[in-house]
Amino acid sequence: MKKNLLLLFAVLCSVQSMFALTIESGQYYTIANRNDVNLYVKDTGVDIIQMGALDDACFWQLIATANNGCYYLKNKKTGRYAQQCSTSAEVNVTMGDSPVEYRVKECPAEGTDMFGLTSTNQSNCEFTAGCIGWNWKGDNTVQTFAAAAGTNPAPSGNSPW
């Protein structure tokens, strides 16, 4: 019985690791909208984070911090960092020169390769009801958005996540 439980545990751990977010140091990634994978998060050099077609401004380095699951989001083209999410919904997310810690969390309830992003200044970083994180706005900007329940419908990880 003990041997069977250990085998089951090993199988479950290997299945979980197949779906875990793996970020490699020194690599760059794109972040696409969960509803339109042709809209990418980008830093065009203006104050706010925008979305649009794939180009050089769409590549991001996720630099691990000392906290598990937390990263600085640095744009490859501009070298700037995503700044804190506002604690209020419907506020544009901005770019700046100083790194800000973000939690990047898998949201499997939203679908395959879906991830939530929120700065760690939020009291809730787990993408449960009330979590403030990134969301695409119709005018092609990224705003803060409070999850209604479960997960936050934020931009998702896109290949090569």
Image (tube, grey):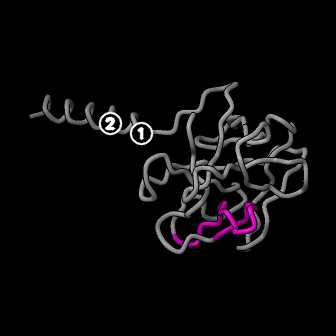
Q: Name the residue under label 1.
A: 19
Where in the figure is residue 126, as x and y percent of width and height?
A: 54, 58
Question: Which residue is the extreme one toward the top?
Answer: 26
Give the x, y percent position of residue 62: 69, 37
Q: What element carries label 1?
A: helix
**Marks 1/2: CA–CA distance:** 7 Å
Q: Quadrant of residue 94?
A: bottom right
Q: Is residue 107 magenta?
A: no
In the rendered structure, find residue 15 and report the number of the disc placed on it: 2
Q: What is the three-letter code of the residue carrying label 2?
A: Val
Front one among 80 and 59:
59
Classify the position of the C terminus by image quarter: top right
Q: How many labels does the image show?
A: 2
Q: What stretch is highlighted in magenta?
A: 129-145
Residue drawn at the location 58% of the way across and 56% of the way down: 36
The three-letter amino acid code for the residue at tag 1 is Phe
Residue 29: which quarter of the image? top right
